[in-house]
Image (cartoon, grey):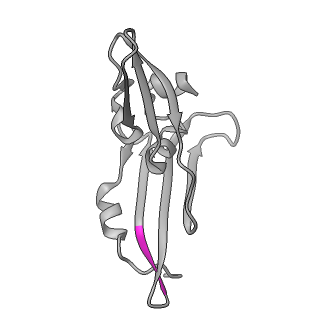
Amino acid sequence: VGGNICTGSPISDLNPLWMVTGAKFQIIDCKGKIRTTAAENFFLGYRKVGLASDEILLSIFLPWTRPFEFVKEFKQAHRRDDDIAIVNAGMRVFLEEKNGKWVVSDASIAYGGVAPLSISAAKTKEFLIAKTWNKE
């Protein structure tokens, strides 16, 4: 998993999920100094990540979901199995009940395969916050 993350491929199936779940990466340098960065800020460009030449990925923290928090992934590829993605996505929504209705309290959406790095759909997140969650 660490190699997959540090490669920084824009079509990695996991990178959008790391981003939307709020995963944190611990990084250690050759002197033992440890720092933590959010997955959302780790991917910098095409196969470029937030690691200095004297750093390696030490650990990954993936938070548990809360009640009424849902995470889903999506992958579109040419073949059904064992193929690289044309596009992939990670999506997360956290719902809260307010006045008898379900309301989006927080959300995240990230895409891979559409840019030189996995990207967050920040404007869509902003649009979804405080919206009523229903069949429409």
* Residue under the point 41% across and 38% down: 39
Residue 76 position, x and y percent, is 57, 47
Residue 125, quarter of the rendered image = bottom left
Q: How many marks?
A: 0
* Depth order, front residue of 103/43: 103
* Residue under the point 50% across and 50% down: 90
Residue 116 visible in this rendered orientation of the protein:
no
Q: Which residues are magenta?
A: 101-105
Query: Is 68 contained in the magenta span?
Result: no
Residue 75 position, x and y percent, is 57, 47
In the displayed structure, would residue 91 be above or below residue 49?
Answer: below
Residue reaching furthest to the front: 32
* Residue under the point 47% across and 22% down: 57
In the displayed structure, would residue 117 be above or below residue 4?
Answer: below
In the displayed structure, would residue 9 be above or below residue 69?
Answer: above
Residue 50 visible in this rendered orientation of the protein:
yes
Residue reaching furthest to the right: 81
Query: Is 103 contained in the magenta span?
Result: yes
* Depth order, front residue of 23/78: 23
Figure quadrant of the N terminus:
top right
In the displayed structure, would residue 56 be above or below residue 63?
Answer: above
Residue 135 position, x and y percent, is 53, 82
* Residue under the point 34% across and 62% down: 124
Residue 16 position, x and y percent, is 47, 44
